[in-house]
Amino acid sequence: MDSKLVFSGVQPTGNLHLGNYLGAVKRFVELQDADTMCIYCLVDLHAITNWQDPKELRRNTIEVTAAFLACGLRQENSIIFNQSQVSTHTELAWIFNCVARIGWLNRMTQFKEKAGKNRENASLGLYCYPTLMAADILAYHATHVPVGEDQKQHLELTRDIAMKFNNDFKTPGFFPIPEPIIEGTATRIMSLRDGTKKMSKSEASEMSRINLTDDSDSIRKKIQKAKTDPFEIPSVKEELVNRPEAENLLGIYATLANQSIEKTLEQFSGSDFKKLKDELSDILISELDPINKEIKKLLNEETYIVEILRMGSEEADHISRPILQKTREIVGFLK
Ligand code: TYM
């Protein structure tokens, strides 16, 4: 094992979609297989920053864990757990609420997007969401955080919190400054209905995203109906400027085929979207069909999944508890 420690989280707020898979979970599996200590968390405390039906939250936590396992995460190689079972996160988050500045949180674009026009009515949890995220990462002294592009600003805030804490308490290096891992061709997968918008669980139309639980027929249908433009596929990358839908579909294909955009353009240059859509559907189905089948199988084994989360939570507590204890001493709390 190397000295890297990887941490990342996913909200259990519904099915995982292709953006979550290519931008995050597939990378989680690669890192796990690179002999690095990896901790992956179902962030149910983050999920309730918007009201969740309790039965659905429970169901989604089980489903997203099943998806993690179906994508290839293994309990033997990674710690897989749900955030609310490990209280070190919330304790550390409170300390970070007192380190982070209101001005820093006021700059968070995701809060602005999620709160929308009715900001006064957003939960306080949604506002201080990023300090809990910093606690998730720093409670383990994690050094690397694989995420999609949309989490970049939250990672920068985490780094600022770690630096300010180390400075304020004169404990240089106590919290490591974590590195985001935002790499590859799939850091921002876009909606199939609008190539300028991120693929997201919160978009109303199911046609805008491919879910890991979609069967082959729905995948084919969604790709066939995906928005395109009237031009043919170009031969060079520069010609994809102002063609967000073409760029997105080609990017998804390139990622799944494990090849560059240039190579993908060479393959499809001069053809119409039908060819691209047919081949994209095929490659998506061959990647996602085994995952889909495995999720279905695992959903019949709820007790097994609950037990994985329980054991993972114990391990997570075991690692983060001494770090929290040390933080408490640094801050000046009595034992
Ligand atoms: P969440 O649950 O929204 O998304 C989970 C992961 O999927 C990535 N992602 C995407 N990547 C590419 N294209 C997309 N369209 C796309 N949509 C989502 C996200 O970037 C993320 O990596 N705040 C986080 C969860 C979190 C966390 C953490 C992450 C809580 N604590 C600590 C890392 C470390 C979130 O809401 O992710």
Image (cartoon, rainbow, N blue to C red):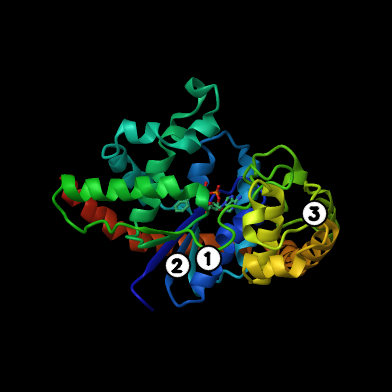
In what element is the residue under mark 1? helix
Q: Position of residue 250 (x, y in %)?
A: 70, 60
Where is mark 2, residue-wise?
A: 38
In what element is the residue under mark 2? strand
- In the rendered image of this protein, does residue 72 appear above or below residue 316? below
Camera-side mark, 2 or 1: 1
Residue closest to the eye, 211 or 283: 283
Tell me how far mark 3 sits from mark 1, CA to CA: 26 Å
Where is mark 3, residue-wise?
A: 223
User: Mark 3 or mark 1: which comes first in sequence?
Assistant: 1
Tell me how far mark 2 sits from mark 1, CA to CA: 8 Å
User: Mark 2 or mark 1: which comes first in sequence?
Assistant: 1
Q: Residue at x 45, y 49 (%)?
A: 152
The answer to whether residue 72 shows anywhere in this view is yes
Q: Would you call the spot at circle 1 few (<14 residues within 10 Å), some (14-19), or many (20 or more)?
A: many
Where is mark 1, residue-wise?
A: 28
The answer to whether residue 63 shows anywhere in this view is no
Query: What's the residue type where badge 1 is placed?
Result: Phe
Q: Position of residue 143 (x, y in %)?
A: 35, 62
Residue closest to the eye, 240 or 107: 240
